[in-house]
Image (tube, rainbow, N blue to C red):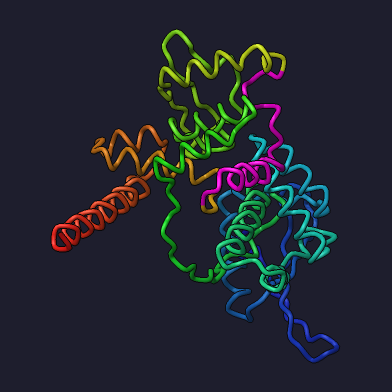
Amino acid sequence: MNGEPKVWIRKRTMKDGKTRYDLRWICPTEHRWKSRKVKGGGRKQAEREAAQLEDKLMTGAYVALRKATWADFAKEHIALIEGGAHKAIMQRTLDEFADVVQPKRLSDVTYATIERYAHHCHEAGNNTSTVNKKLRYIRVTLNRAVKRGYLARSPMTGWEWQRETQRLPRVLTAGEQGKLLAACTDKQWRTFVYIALTTGCRRAELLNLEWSRVDFENAQLAITGTKAKQDRVQPLSAEGVRLLRALQPATLKDGGPFKSINANSAPKVFKKLVDAAGIPPCTIHDLRRTFCTDLARVGVNQLVVQKLAGHSSATTTAKYYQLADDAMKRDAIERLTATKAG
């Protein structure tokens, strides 16, 4: 190449008077000219992208972008996801995104279209936490598109996230836990709630649990396909073993104790159980929060709680100790007030 640049920047003036920059280069694998539009920014952005592209060409890291429609890539992306609950949420998010933005190609997804989707979610009544959660699913999808060679750069690079209002986690009291279990007249759901409260397993981990992963002899579960990407062994209480043994005959054909529970409808069924129990609103994930907080309250070592919960970060576990500490402080004030009142 004799030191000559491999990437050229082309400046174009459009009919509306706006300036657009394109990159042009010779594809080393296809041996023909290729070009792409620089999205957003001006000359400096074009120069940055040109330098990055030229570096890839010089080092042999360049990969010709694959072409795909948004619908085809979304289908491919969903098919590669493991876990029923996580997969269902991703599917709903991408379907909603497609309905709002209506992209035909992956390249149609830009920073502006993502902003439009975020605005739609807010207008639909979603709170900031929910909108951020949906946008994180979109970000993961676009990052996968980059890694698989469909996009040169994620349009969510530099995305400005909205600050979420910090809320205290919902933790069930011992009395509320008893009422909830009593409201579970269905054997499968009673077992599901009890195991969630006494193991802290995530919803997806329980819904995807296979009978081959249930070790009755050693009273433990082998949890795989975790959020932290690390398998773990979860001990079972004697009552947990008893409930699972009683459930096995009716669910053996399903392959797992909770595989017949629909991931999409599970939150609605759980809400009905909460209403029937007559306790304040809570979610399935609050059972996991309750498990972690209860362990912290009885003084279980933080490292042990982190391992039982499958947290990848000690910071995540620490917040439950803060919550337990706050509860003990309130209890101390109440006891002090009671002595003064007497």
Q: Is residue 259 magenta?
A: yes
The residue depicted at 48 percent of the width and 41 percent of the height is 287
Q: Quadrant of the N terminus?
A: bottom right
Please tell me which residue is depicted at 66% across the width and 52% down the height of the picture.
Answer: 141
Picture layout, residue 341 above or below residue 239: below
Q: Residue furthest top?
A: 217
Q: Is residue 334 above or below residue 61?
A: below
Residue extending farthest front: 342
- Magenta span contains residue 263: yes
Is the residue 173 above or below the residue 240 in the image?
below
**x and y percentages locating residue 17 in the rendered image:** 79, 91
Q: Residue at x 63, y 20 (%)?
A: 256
Q: Give the x, y percent position of residue 243.
A: 53, 19
Quarter of the image for the C terminus: give it: bottom left
First to last magenta residue range: 254-279
Question: Would you identify the image quadrant in which residue 263 lies?
Answer: top right
Residue occupying the point 56% across, 30% down = 192
Q: Is residue 284 left or right of residue 84?
A: left
User: How many marks do you count on the picture?
Assistant: 0
Q: Residue furthest bottom?
A: 17
* In the image: residue 192, left or right of residue 265: left
Q: Classify residue 197 as left or right of residue 102.
A: left
Q: Nearer the viewer, residue 102 or 298?
A: 298
Is 214 on the left or on the right of 253, as rendered? Answer: left
Rendered location of residue 267, percent (x, y): 64, 45
250, 330: nearer the viewer:
330
Is residue 160 or residue 291 the one in the foreground? 291
Q: Position of residue 254 (x, y in %)?
A: 71, 19
